[in-house]
Amino acid sequence: TAELEHLIQAQQQMIRSQQGTIESLTGWRSNRLMRGFRCKLIEARVLAGEPISLRDRRLLDAGRDQGVAAGQVVITRRLLHDLDVALPPKLVVLGRNYVVGRITECAGFSATLQLVTDRGFEMPAALWRSVGSGQRRTLYVKLPDGRRQQVVVAHDGRTPGRHTVGDPVAVRAQGNGREIVLGDVPAEHDVQPGDILTASESTELIPFGLKIGEVTRTEPAKKDAHFVNVYVRPFADIRTLSEVYIVLPVSD
C-alpha cells in the first residue's frame, strides 16, 4: 500500500542519514578483506520473519527498485563502497560483520532474506583450521610434486589469540534449520571446535575470507568413517538481526 511504501522510504532515509556515523564507528575503511573489493551498499531493515520452525527467512525493506536481485548474499558489516561507479546487474547482501544469508525474492520495496541456517541455504565456503596458545595440530600439506606430507604446526606465541594454520579446506555449507552443516569433510583434516568458516574463493560476490561462523562440534559420517559432518554456529546473532546491507560489486 501507499502508506507502507511511505513508511519504508522514511526508514531508508533514516538509515542513510546514520551511515556516516556508523562507518566511522565500525572502522570499515580499515577492513583488510574489503581493500580492492569495490562495491555499493544498499541498506535494508528486517521487517518480519516467518516462524523459525518453518523457514529461516526474513522480509527486508530493500527490493527491486534499489537493484536487489535474487541470489545475492547477506553479511553483517557495513562495507566500503563507491556511489559514482557503474553498477553490475546483480547484488550481494551484507549485514554488520559476518555472512548471514542471501536474497531469494524481490518486490518493488522489499526482499526476502534466506538465512544461513535455513534448510534450503547452500553455498561454497572455506574452513580454516586454527591453534590456540600452547596448542599443536597435525596437518597434511600438498607438496609441489602432488604428494602429501604430514606436518605438526604450533601456535607461535606472539599473540594470545588463535592463529590459522595450513590451507583452507573447501567445503559446502548448508543450513539444517538450527545451524550450519558441512557434510562429508575428510576426517584427515582433523577439524576441531574453534575452527572458522568463511566465504569461499569461488564466491565472487563477496570477499574471500569473510567470516560466517565457528565450528562447535564434529560427528563421524554414518556412511563412511573416513569423513565427518561438521557443525557451525553463525557468528551473527540471527535472532536479533534488525539491519542488513546488500552488497553490489562494481567493475573497475
Image: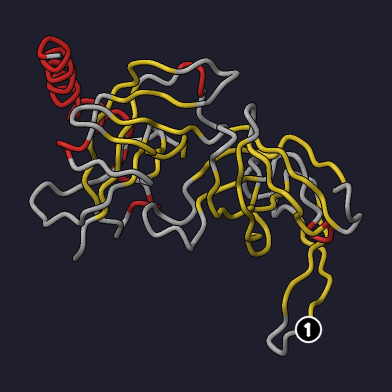
Image quadrant where one finds the C terminus: bottom left
* Image quadrant where residue 87 sits: bottom left
Horizontally, residue 82 falls left or right of residue 79, namely: left
Can you give x and y, in whole percent of width and height, for residue 81 in the image?
21, 47
Horizontally, residue 43 falls left or right of residue 219, namely: left
Horizontally, residue 66 falls left or right of residue 102, namely: left
Image quadrant where one finds the N terminus: top left
Farthest top residue in view: 3
Can you give x and y, in whole percent of width and height, for residue 153 in the image?
77, 61
Tell me what residue is drawn at x 50 percent, y 51 percent.
199
Tally of numbered tags: 1
Q: How is the image coloured?
A: secondary structure
Given residues 171 and 14, the one toward you in this image is: 171
Farthest bottom residue in view: 145
Tell me what residue is drawn at x 57 percent, y 32 percent.
117
* Image quadrant where residue 66 sits: top left
Amino acid at pointer 1: Arg
Horizontally, residue 72 falls left or right of residue 237, namely: left
Can you give x and y, in whole percent of width and height, for residue 43 in the image?
24, 31
Residue matched to label 1: 147
Disc 1 crowd rating (10 Å Cα; few below 14, some 14-19, many 20+) is few
**Element carrying mark 1:** loop
Farthest right residue in view: 225
Q: Is residue 138 above or below residue 84?
A: below
Tell me what residue is drawn at x 15 percent, y 36 percent.
65
Can you give x and y, in whole percent of width and height, for residue 56 in the image?
52, 26
Given residues 6 and 98, the one toward you in this image is: 6
* Image quadrant where residue 52 sits: top right
Tell me what residue is drawn at x 37 percent, y 38 percent.
103
